[in-house]
Image: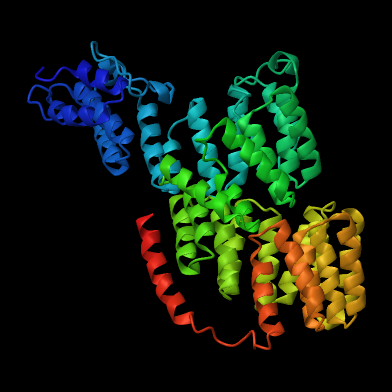
Amino acid sequence: MDVPKDQIATLMEHGLYDSAEMLGCFLVSSSTVSAEASPHLKAETLILLGDALFHQREYRRAIHTYKQALHHCARVPKQSSGISRSSLSLSTRSSVNASSVSAINENEVRFKIASSHFALSETKAAIAEMESVKTRSLEMNILMAKLHRNSGYNRGAIAFYKECLRQCPYVLEAIIGLAELGATAKDIISAFTQTSSRSAKVSLDQIDPTRWLQRYVEAQCCVASHAYKGALELFAELLQRFPNNVHLLTETAKVEAIIGKNDEAIMRFEKVRSIDPYTLTCMDEYAMLLQMKCDYSRLNKLVHDLLSIDHTRAEVFVALSVLWERKDPRTALSYAEKSIRVDERHIPGYIVKGNFLLLAKRPEAAAIAFRAAQNLRSDLRSYQGLVHSYLAFGKTKEALYTAREAMNAMPQSAKALKLVGDVHANTSSGREKAKKFYESALRLEPGYLGAAIALADLHLMEGRNGDAVSLLERYLKDWADESLHVKLAQVFAATNMLQDSLSHYQAALRINPQNEAAKKGLDRLEKQMKGIDPDAADENDENDVEDVDGDTEEAELM
């Protein structure tokens, strides 16, 4: 043979895929590797070349090459071919023993074709390729679970996830997938104790003697069912056993962000970065929290760090979008859309896109983005976005239905109750109902300032300015929060009590010097106090437009 086949295997084992691909071209074109004389050898060489292309992410070429290999396999006489249809691990796909006539695993080749289709988001083609594989390995089952879930075949996805757990109970992505698809903790744990042959059972004590895995399952089921308080308690218990566990800290921070414990979530994400400064998982969630806190210094540093780690990830584009929201909304929206193109199942990308579209007064488009996030996995943010989108273009009935759906899904959530109140507050006839929902939310969670501010706004709508001021001042005694100061400042400014308004804007800025609402409000107030119309056009507007163009160019460079 002109080109030794074992040399390509050696290059593959050492990760030298460029060289393996180039050498593979020599091998498959060699006159000594005749498809007529030795179809088995031709198939083996094509599989090696396909493996090199797969690792280089040249998936279309890999699919074409693998299919050529299967074509040659079909020409090998069955009684002497040594072709195997048994299942092998994907980790061995590049380790072909080239020194002897090795068995060609057709199932493994089909799995590689399906994996290539999956990488190209060609779900139907991937499923079609895998349907001919009857005996599946663990990695084949996890791929099938993902494919079925992406296609909306949830029953099939559940079955394949459970099969993964029968083969190995520590496939954590299968646990999370089952929880998100509505499986109970008991149902998931029962899959652990069944062997893949289904003829025998093993004890849970043998698999999980300290019960940490069981607690993890329960925590993920709590998250999926919106029982966030229970999830935090279980994650806290696990963190006592596994301190500084980056995955558990990240999961905890995600839940804290969802329920509005923003300061705690920020501290948790900071701890994650101190332990592992190169992690990208959920760092876009951290970026969104920093933007909400108007902490643009830390947000800018975070985005710079993420870009230096991997500028191709969806999380990085979401972080870029929240950074650019203040400078150029169009560029920010463009980055959010890029994150979705990179990963069409990345929920924060849809949430951020929906928020930007709402700000741009495009509620119909925002509703589509929030609905996409909801279809992937419902959480409080997608419910809130949908409700506010529907209200923005006058679909009160749909808004109320969605808010009630959130309340039914999260009966112990003050934020879900407040969401129903928001819909009722949108109509003059529903304000009394809105008041009851806001008060119920405050009874459930006394420290929920969003409900307190919404109730104050309701008082203002009905001309009860004194009640609004009393409510906000009462909350300020227990919670020195910048949002309360800003709301009080706005109330006093509206009633021409400018000096009181000034003191509250200043108090808000002492707590958070970057608070955008306080800075803008203070700017308007100072103009009012000088007798200048705060709504008059700024003479620097033209310069601001020019700056935006410059910012857009800079964004493209980033």
Q: Nearer the viewer, residue 225 or 126?
A: 225
Q: Nearer the viewer, residue 365 or 327?
A: 327
Q: Is residue 147 above or below residue 14?
A: below
Image quadrant of residue 45?
top left
Report x, y in % for residue 498: 78, 79
Q: Is residue 35 above or below residue 252?
A: above
Tell me the residue at 71%/13% (across/down). Answer: 206
Report x, y in % for residue 134: 47, 29
Q: Is residue 546 above or below residue 318?
A: below
Image quadrant of residue 365?
bottom right
The residue sitting at the left extreme is 31
How does the figure colour the protein chain or chains? rainbow
Tell me the residue at 64%/57% (across/down). Answer: 292
Q: Nearer the viewer, residue 476 or 282?
A: 476
Visible residue check, residue 437: no
Quadrant of image for the C terminus: bottom left
Q: Nearer the viewer, residue 464 or 23?
A: 464
Image quadrant of residue 294?
bottom right
Visible residue check, residue 102: yes
Tell me the residue at 49%/49% (across/down). Answer: 303
Q: Is residue 429 left or right of residue 79?
A: right
Report x, y in % for residue 149: 56, 45
| Label total for image | 0
Q: Is residue 445 left or right of residue 34?
A: right
Q: Is residue 368 above or below residue 274?
A: below
Quadrant of image for the N terminus: top left
Report x, y in % for residue 164: 58, 28
